[in-house]
Amino acid sequence: MIINLIKNIPLWTCYRDLGDGTCKGDKPSFFLCNTVRFIPRWRNIFYLPGSILLFTCLCACVTNVDNTILQTLTISTASGEGINFNVEVAKDERSRRRGLMYRRSMPLDQGMLLDFNRPRKVSIWMKNTHIPLDLIFIDAKGVIIEIVSNTEPLSTKLIQSDALIRAVLEINANQALEHNINVGDQIMFDIFIT
């Protein structure tokens, strides 16, 4: 597709000698004329770098999505059941702020773990988040402190923790209820002190 786009950009204008002392501007066609002069069409020279830049940006976006590293997080419930989620880990401020914003869907067995690196009170909102979520607030030992179920997509209402939180697990709405995940259950993941 991009090759066809580049091939059809006239970077040069070809003038053919028609034999009677006149010339006709045309796309380059080497087999139709004996005398060919190429004159650059400067305004079109800028299409090529622009096309290359656009193609590079599109490739970078696709690569970023495909290279997302998922790690397995296990929730050990009171009944002894272990529930696994494949999670993206947001460790820095920028990735925590973005969270799951702008995504339209997420597989049921996936989620995002917002790692705040140290225990603190946190506030979260659903601005630009199109997926309803369950928010699971977790302390430094990996114990679930609070669960906020079925959050409202696109809401700017702040959801705050009352206790000191090390991380927040974001999963699809109603997954906590469906898997019988409750306050006091243990999260098994390498950032938590057990």
Image: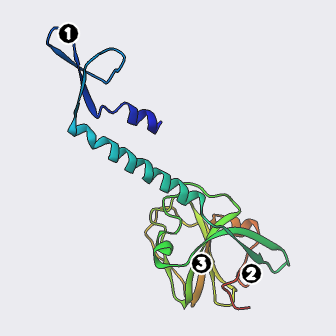
Instruction: Left or right? Give the position of 112 relative to 39.
Output: right
* Circle 2: residue type: Met
Q: Residue at x 39, y 36 (%)?
A: 6
Q: Residue furthest top?
A: 20
User: What type is the residue that disc 3 sits on?
Assistant: Val
Q: CA distance from mark 3 to mark 1?
A: 78 Å
Residue position marked by numbered label 3 in the rendering: 168
Is 30 displayed left or right of 139 in the figure? left
Residue 118 in the figure: left or right of residue 143: left
Q: Secondary structure at mark 3?
A: strand
Q: Quadrant of the C terminus?
A: bottom right
Residue contact at pointers 1 and 2, CB within 8 angstroms: no
Separation of marks 1 and 2 at Cα, in angstroms? 84 Å
Colouring chosen for the image of the structure: rainbow
Which element carries disc 1, helix, strand or loop? loop
Q: Kindly identify the amino acid type of the residue bearing the numbered disc 1.
A: Gly
Residue 76's label in the rendered image is none
Residue picked out by circle 1: 19
Sort mark 2 into few (<14), some (14-19) or many (20+) by Cα contacts within 10 Å. Answer: many
N-term mark: 1 or 2: 1
Q: Is 167 left, or right, of 35 in this rendering?
A: right
The residue where tag 2 is placed is: 188
Front residue (pair 40, 185): 40
Quadrant assignment, res 34:
top left
